[in-house]
Every structure is written in C-alpha cells, then in structure tokens.
Image (tube, helix red, strand yellow):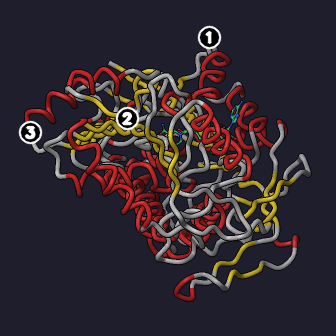
C-alpha cells in the first residue's frame, strides 16, 4: 500500500447534477451536490436508512444540499469497514502512513479556496476566518502528525505504543473541517482506523475531505464518515467494535456518553464546553488587551469552546477599557460571510440563535445592563449583533453558563487574588487569558488559573504542537502535541 493519486469518484452520481456556487469571492467556484451519501470503505454510498436532512446556509436560509442520516445499519457497515481495514493499516510501515498524511495535507492546501468557501457557506463563518484559520490549520494538523507517524517511540520513550483499533470520533459544528483534522490526523498517524461523525448542520467539508482521501488513494475503510444527528452519534459511540471514542461537543452530551460508556472498556476522551475568563490588569497595554477581548469573544460569532466570554477588568482601568471596547465593537462589520471584510458572520443555526436570544433575555431580566452594536443585520438568515453586558453579578446566568454566541459579560475586580478567585469560580476549565505588563504576574496568575490553556497577552492562538483540552467539566484528554497522541496508543512495557 503506497499513496497513489487517483481521480475522486463523484459522490452519489445518480442524484442529479451538482450546482456551482458562483457568488463566491475572488471567482472561486464551489460545486455542491444536491445530495450526499455516506463515505464507507472508500466509496460514497446511499444510506441504508434512505433518510436525508437539509444542510442550510445560515446566512441566506437556502438549502445547500441534502445529507444522509445514518441509522444503526449504516453505522454497523462503517464500523465493519474500519475494523476490516485496521490490521493492514496498523502493520503498514509508519513512514508509509506518514506519506498518506502528507498527501492529505498537501491536497487540503491545494483545495484551500474551495474548502474555505464551502465552510463559510455551510457554517456561516466569515470567509477571512475560514481562509486564514480553519483551512490552513487543518492542513497543519495533517502535516504535524505526518511527522510523528514514524517517531512514535518518542511518545513513550523506552516503551512501545501500539494502536488501539477502531476509533469513533464525534465533532461539533463550530470548526467543522478543523475539528475533523484534529481528530483524524493523530488517529491515523498512530495506526488506528476511524469512523467520524460530523455535526448535523455542517457536514459538507468533512465529505469534501473524503474526496481528498480518495484522491490520495487512502486505503478503503481507513476513514469512514457517517453523517446524521445525535442518534447516529449515540449508535456509533455504543458500537461494540469501537475501541475508543473521541468526542468534542457540549458538556451535557459528554457526561451522558461518559455514563453510557462506563464499564464498556472503551477508551474515552472528552473536549467539552467552557466559560473562559479573560483578565485585564491595570498595567496592561489597554489597546492590545481590548483587541484580545474582541478576538476572544467575537471570533467565529463566539461559537468557540474557549471563547473569552467572562471579561474581568481591574477597577482602575474599567472606564478606559469599556470606552475603547465600545469603539472597537462598533467598528465590527456584521453580514455576508463571503465578503472578505466581514468580521461577524451568521449564527450557525436557527436553534443556536434561539439559545443565544434566551441568554440575552436572561441577562436583561436578571438585572445586567446590555449594549449592542448599531450594526444593521441582513433581512434573511440568522444573525446576532455583537453584544456585551456590564453590571454582571457572578450569580447571573450569563456569567455562569456557556452561551456559545457573541455575548460578553464584563465584571470588575480589585486585587489579583480576587481576579483569580472569580476566574476559577466556574465548573469549566478550558481556557483563560491574562493581560499585564509584568512577567512575574503572568507566571503567578497563569500557574494558578484552573484551565487547560492560558494565553498571556494574546487570545485564541492555536498550534498543532500545543496540547489543547480542559480541566473540570471542560473534559479530559488533550488534542495536539505529543500529549494528543497518548490517547490513540496503548502502552506496552
Ligand atoms: P453537541 O454536544 O450538541 O453535539 C456535538 C456532536 O455530538 C454533534 O456531532 C452531535 O450530533 C453529536 N451528538 C449529539 N447528541 C449525541 C449523543 N447523545 N450521542 C452521541 N453524539 C451526540 O454540541 P454542539 O452544539 O454541536 O457543539 C457546541 C459544544 O461543543 C459547545 O459546548 C462547545 O464548547 C463544545 N466544543 C468544545 C470544544 C473543545 O475542544 N473543548 C471544541 C468545539 C466545541
């Protein structure tokens, strides 16, 4: 088995002609099939369930395509394909596995424009984010893990790591292709095979990735993609031949999966929700900090697990921070995600918009003071203005629960001890930000924040070499770096 490029077989040819989305920026044409089947054993196939769901462009409410809903029989077929492919993939020379990963990374780069437009159409995020973050970072994850494939002995120095088997991977809708890359790349590098389930509102780029797997000649069954909603995910997680589940999503579903899998012998890693603090001290560079706050909460419409949704400002600079924040927020452009000047795109789904509105109502009814930018919203589609609340109490719902939208809660503090106590006063522990001019304060505060990632004088920066994951109810296990490989290997001494 060595990588040999071949022409991708068209998904579901008998469903009619693809249509091309011509309105994409810079003339990039993206063809979208009217219907997509499942990707099993290296081929696209109609679901045994015969059922499909709409994939909607949240900026226009247009139906982009229909995507298969996999049932138990479909999941069985995909897991059987992954199980059959495992012995050969596991025995493949690691340097050969690496070649496949390199080729996938290269094809993602070569098809980057198309993937970026498709991601933006399907998910609503601004094209500048898909183009500059999601797609290049997805390619980087494959490059990075290609490098590890033949160096796994360094993961457990002096010991032997062996692959686990069939890995079920379930991902959310906020970074669809990037989350697929975070999951698939380390699993394959370690010699496992995969059944991936994308989120129900954003399956299109994962299916496009399947075309790339065909193009690079990835052996059939090594990665299988089953689309569908929660029932499909539950069937996949419970399948007896799945040896490991990697889940990224809400804390509620993560807890349910942990309960269901207890005693099953399956390995489990959970990347869950967050309510991350972003702390500005009086000695910080305020302009830089305010930029970081905007990046922390309005990037990807706030649909970010590590969003800096709780802002803590030291009392002496509160007025200055709020004044500058207001100016910055008013300058954010909300609207057409395909416009390269857009800062905030569409909310991913009508359901998520309803959730965000409920939280905004709660903020108002519990006594916080709301501000919203004067941005004009498009008539169609799902939109939310950049929103921030002051006079927020720690007991308020908007200060405690994950909103997963462009809504910031601003609170004040007097001393570093108070900042730490309030920042850590949450059931979550995914990320945190610290803004200060003092190096010693950075080390002290960062070491005492209970969060898996702490950014200092920056926010929302990612690197494939840097392990990402949470404390407390934000989950367990890490993705990225050497530590991310540990959850895809069994250890032998
Ligand atoms: P979700 O939990 O509703 O869904 C996530 C995925 O799980 C989807 O593919 C969904 O179809 C599937 N699913 C739903 N119910 C299931 C069940 N009972 N069994 C198996 N699978 C099931 O979450 P979401 O709304 O798609 O995503 C938002 C959440 O994800 C937020 O809480 C966010 O913080 C979290 N998230 C975490 C990270 C991280 O790395 N920690 C990254 C991105 C998103």
Residue 466 screen position, x and y as percent: 30, 43
Q: Relative to 266, is 471 on the left or the right?
A: left
Asked where in the image residue 377 lies, by quadrant, the reply is: bottom right
Tell which circle, 1 or 3, labels the residue nearer the N-terminal end.
1
Asked where in the image residue 380 lies, by quadrant, the reply is: bottom right
- Mark on residue 21? none
Q: Distance of mark 1 from mark 3, alpha carbons?
A: 46 Å
**Above or below, 336 relative to 270:** below
Q: Distance of mark 2 from mark 3, alpha carbons?
A: 24 Å
Residue in front for this viewpoint, 37 or 45: 37
For label 3, being within 8 Å of ligand 1 is answered: no
Tell which circle, 2 or 1, labels the residue nearer the N-terminal end.
1
- Mark on residue 439? 3
Callout 1 secondary element = loop
Q: Relative to 425, is 114 on the left or the right?
A: right
Asked where in the image residue 423 lies, by quadrant, the reply is: top left
Residue 78 screen position, x and y as percent: 73, 43
Residue in front for this viewpoint, 118 or 245: 118
For label 1, being within 8 Å of ligand 1 is answered: no
Q: Residue at x 56, y 39 (%)?
A: 403
Of the 4 image quadrants, the one containing the C terminus is: top left
Residue in front for this viewpoint, 367 or 57: 367
Residue in front for this viewpoint, 314 or 309: 314
Q: Distance of mark 2 from mark 1, alpha carbons?
A: 43 Å
Q: Is residue 274 visible?
A: yes
- Mark on residue 263? 1
Q: Residue at x 56, y 58 (%)?
A: 385
Say if mark 2 contacts mark 1, CB within 8 Å.
no
Callout 3 secondary element = helix
Residue under label 2: 411
């Amino acid at each position: 088995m060595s990588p040999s490029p071949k022409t991708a077989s068209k998904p579901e040819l008998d469903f009619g002609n693809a249509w091309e989305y011509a309105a994409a920026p810079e003339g990039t044409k993206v063809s979208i099939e009217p219907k997509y089947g499942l990707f099993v054993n290296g081929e696209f196939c109609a679901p045994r369930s015969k059922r499909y769901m709409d994939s909607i462009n949240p900026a226009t409410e247009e139906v982009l395509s229909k995507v298969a809903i996999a049932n138990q029989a479909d999941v069985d077929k995909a897991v059987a394909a992954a199980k059959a492919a495992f012995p050969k993939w596991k025995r493949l020379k690691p340097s050969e596995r690496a070649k496949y990963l390199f080729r996938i990374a290269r094809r993602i780069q070569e098809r980057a424009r198309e993937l970026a437009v498709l991601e933006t159409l399907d998910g609503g995020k601004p094209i500048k984010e898909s183009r500059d973050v999601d797609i290049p970072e997805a390619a980087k994850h494959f490059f990075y893990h290609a490098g590890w494939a033949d160096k796994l002995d360094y993961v457990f120095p002096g010991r032997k790591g062996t692959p686990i088997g069939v890995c079920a991977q379930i991902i959310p809708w906020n970074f669809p292709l990037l989350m697929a890359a975070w999951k698939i790349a380390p699993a394959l590098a370690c010699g496992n095979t995969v059944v991936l389930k994308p989120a129900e509102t954003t399956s299109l780029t994962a299916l496009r990735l399947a075309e790339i797997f065909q193009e690079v000649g990835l052996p059939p069954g090594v990665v299988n993609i089953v689309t569908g909603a929660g029932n499909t995910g539950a069937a996949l997680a419970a399948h007896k031949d799945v040896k490991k589940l990697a889940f990224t999503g809400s804390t509620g579903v993560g807890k349910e999966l942990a309960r269901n899998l207890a005693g099953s012998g399956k390995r489990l890693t959970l990347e869950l929700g967050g309510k991350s603090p972003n702390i500005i001290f009086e000695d910080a560079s305020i302009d830089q900090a305010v930029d970081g706050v905007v990046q922390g909460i309005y990037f990807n419409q706030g649909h970010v697990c590590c969003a800096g949704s709780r802002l803590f400002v030291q009392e002496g600079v509160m007025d200055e921070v709020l004044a500058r924040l207001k100016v910055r927020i008013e300058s954010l452009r909300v609207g057409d995600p395909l416009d390269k000047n857009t800062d905030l795109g569409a909310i991913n789904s009508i359901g998520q918009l309803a959730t965000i509105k409920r939280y905004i109502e709660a903020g108002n009814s519990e006594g916080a003071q709301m501000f919203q930018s004067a941005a004009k919203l498009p008539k169609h589609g799902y939109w939310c203005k950049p929103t921030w609340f002051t006079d927020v109490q720690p007991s308020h719902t908007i200060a405690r629960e994950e909103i997963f939208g462009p809504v910031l809660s601003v609170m004040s503090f007097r001393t570093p001890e108070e900042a730490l106590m309030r920042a850590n006063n949450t059931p979550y522990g995914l990320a945190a930000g610290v803004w200060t001019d003092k190096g010693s304060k950075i080390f002290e505060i960062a070491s005492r924040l209970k969060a898996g990632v702490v950014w200092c004088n920056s926010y929302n920066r990612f690197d494939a070499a840097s392990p990402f994951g949470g404390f407390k109810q934000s989950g367990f296990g890490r993705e990225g770096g050497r530590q991310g490989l540990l959850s895809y290997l069994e250890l032998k001494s």
